[in-house]
């Protein structure tokens, strides 16, 4: 299989790319990045692109499965409008071109609680993205909804505090379904999904990720 990756330089994306390169089921891995990652591998093709105009490189979005790990925080983006552009507009644009180019599978990293009907901005944004891609009718569509992510060398203070608090609560038997997950483990589950799941839409909820 030929894998395509957006969000390849993020915490989950880095592990995902590495694991795809080491998996014999994937013959080639294509990443789309804003600047060179410095990574080199015989199976890797890295494209430096302007994400604001996917139309310019749409012909490069060809393969068997597109993985989307793209996302940011409101603080890093600077505004809800900018976060929406990164978390919704870019993955949506890639999905459209991938579908036109007959990419069969789409694997999306969404979020726990994602729902287009949510009153929470982030959850609503993720839910709307899920629905938008669903309407494109990929042969196989897999949605992962992880909870708090445990990232290596994370600079996201709020996320780090949340992970610590939830782990304490988990330790006394509370919020077991809201267990934090290491990005390396999430990446492992992402790589596996297109190979073992059936056609159609599959939603892998937080508590199911650990057992998938």
Image: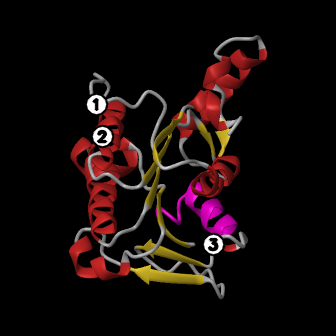
Question: Disc number at residue 173?
Answer: none
Residue 45 image position (x, y, % from top left)? 52, 84
Q: Which residue is mark 1?
A: 116
Looking at the rendered image, the quarter that the N terminus falls into is: bottom right
Q: Give the residue at mark 3.
A: 26
**Alpha carbons under labels 1 and 2: distance apart:** 8 Å
Q: CA distance from mark 3 to mark 1?
A: 33 Å
Q: Is residue 25 left or right of 81 when viewed as pictured?
A: right
Residue displayed at 56% across by 33% down: 147
Taking 93 as reference, is 148 left or right? right
Give the alpha-carbon distance from disc 2 to disc 3, as whole Å. 28 Å
Find numbered disc 1 in the image and state the secondary structure of the residue it sits on.
Answer: loop
Q: Is 120 drawn above or below residue 189 in the view shown?
A: above
Mark 2–mark 3 CB contact (< 8 Å): no
In the image, residue 99 lies at what x, y percent?
31, 64
Q: Report helix, strand or loop for mark 2.
A: helix
Assess whether residue 19 is covered by the magenta stretch: yes
Residue at the bottom extreme? 42
> Looking at the picture, does residue 86 appear above or below residue 116?
below
On the image, the x and y values in percent for residue 18 come to 67, 68
Which mark is first along the chain, 2 or 1? Answer: 1
The quadrant in which the C terminus is found is top right
Q: Is residue 78 visible?
A: no
- Choose top left, top right, bottom left or bottom right for residue 157: top right
Relative to 207, residue 143 above or below: below
Residue farthest to the right, as pictured: 171
In the image, 89: left or right of 184? left
Magenta part of the chain: 6-20
- For this rendering, which residue is in front, 141 or 85? 141
Asked if the residue at tag 2 contacts the one at tag 1, i.e. Cβ–Cβ closer than 8 Å, the answer is yes
- Residue bearing mark 2: 131
| Dominant SS type (magenta) | helix
């Amino acid at each position: 299989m030929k894998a395509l990756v957006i969000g390849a330089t993020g915490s989950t994306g880095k592990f995902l790319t590495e694991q795809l390169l080491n998996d014999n089921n994937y013959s080639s891995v294509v990443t789309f990045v804003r600047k060179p990652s410095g990574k080199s591998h015989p199976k890797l093709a890295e494209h430096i692109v302007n994400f604001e105009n996917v139309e310019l490189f749409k012909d490069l979005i060809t393969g068997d499965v597109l993985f989307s790990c793209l996302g940011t925080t409101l603080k890093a983006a600077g505004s809800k409008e900018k976060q929406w552009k990164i978390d919704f507009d870019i993955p949506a644009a890639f999905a459209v071109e991938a579908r036109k180019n007959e990419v069969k599978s789409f694997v999306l990293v969404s979020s726990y609680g994602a729902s287009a009907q949510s009153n929470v901005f982030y959850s609503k944004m993720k839910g709307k993205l899920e629905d938008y891609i669903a309407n494109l009718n990929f042969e196989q569509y897999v949605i992962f909804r992880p909870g708090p992510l445990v990232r290596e060398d994370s600079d996201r203070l709020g996320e780090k505090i949340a992970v610590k608090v939830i782990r304490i609560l988990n330790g006394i038997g509370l919020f077991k379904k809201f267990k934090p997950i290491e990005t390396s483990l999430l990446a492992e589950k992402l790589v596996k999904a297109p190979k073992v799941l059936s056609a159609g839409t599959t939603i892998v909820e937080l508590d199911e990720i650990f057992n998938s």
